[in-house]
Amino acid sequence: MPSFDHHGAYIYYEEFGQGFPILTFAPAGLASVIAVWSEASAPINPTTEWAANYRVIAMDQRNAGGQSRAPITAQDSWDTYTADHIALLDHLRIDRCHLYGQCIGGSFILNLIKAHPERVQSAVLAQPIGRVGAMAAGRPARFNAWAEGLKDHPEATEPRRSRLRVDGESAVHGPGR
């Protein structure tokens, strides 16, 4: 099982094909996992589309409902995810790669570029807003489903989860998302 430990986090990933590496970030907000790429709603599946010419790397984000797990703290931020992404590249001994992400993947990419521009050959942000139409009031169903999946994390109290999404602002998605 392709995985590694990173500062108390267990990170699961998969690789497809050979060639110059592309690190991919699946859509689905905080439920960004490898399996989303093969859903019918995904406009493209890079794990199958590009594996003939590239080394495509996909990962389950921490606590996204997939196989990556980590303790949840009030200090978790974009930089926490970026540290996971860089740790994966280091684990795979990749100095530089292409980045491809949809929806939340765009935000993952931008923070990785901000933190480590020297690691990025190129980047594609596909559908970075992740939605069409106005956002309904209150917490989105996908956020609630993600929060419900954290029941086995005693540290993921309602106040901590609420700090990630309060009054239309999200520490992960930003204002109004």
Image: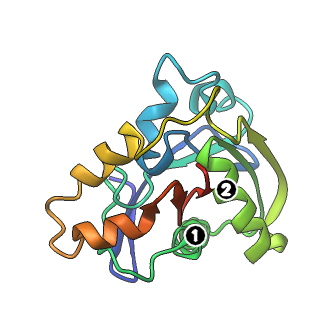
Which residue is under mark 2?
107
Residue at the spot x=22%, y=71% of the render? 157
The picture places residue 173, in percent across and down from the top left corner, at: 58, 56
Is residue 109 among what the camera can see? yes
Location of residue 74 by image quarter: bottom left
Element assignment for label 1? helix
Q: Is residue 159 left or right of residue 111?
A: left
Q: Position of residue 85 (x, y in %)?
A: 58, 65
Residue at label 1? 78
Q: Earlier in the sequence, mark 1 or mark 2?
A: 1
Q: Quarter of the image holding residue 34?
A: top left
- Say which of 126 and 167 sits in front: 167
User: Disc 1, disc 2: CB below 8 Å?
Assistant: yes
Q: Which kind of residue does numbered mark 1 sit on?
A: Trp
Tell me which corner region of the image, top left, top right, bottom left or bottom right, holds residue 42: top right
Residue type at numbered disc 2: Ser
103 vs 157, nearest the viewer: 157
Task: Give the percent coordinates (x, y) of residue 2.
Answer: 39, 55
Secondary structure state at the residue bearing disc 2: helix
* CA distance separating discs 1 and 2: 8 Å
Q: Reply above or below: 110 against 27.
A: below
Above or below, comparing residue 28 to residue 111 in the picture: above
How many dots with numbers? Answer: 2
Q: Is residue 70 visible?
A: no
Q: Nearer the viewer, residue 157 or 49?
A: 157
> Could you tell me residue 25's position as x and y percent?
59, 47
Residue at (48% x, 25% y) in the render: 38
Dot 2, crowdedness within 10 Å: few (<14), some or many (≥20)? many
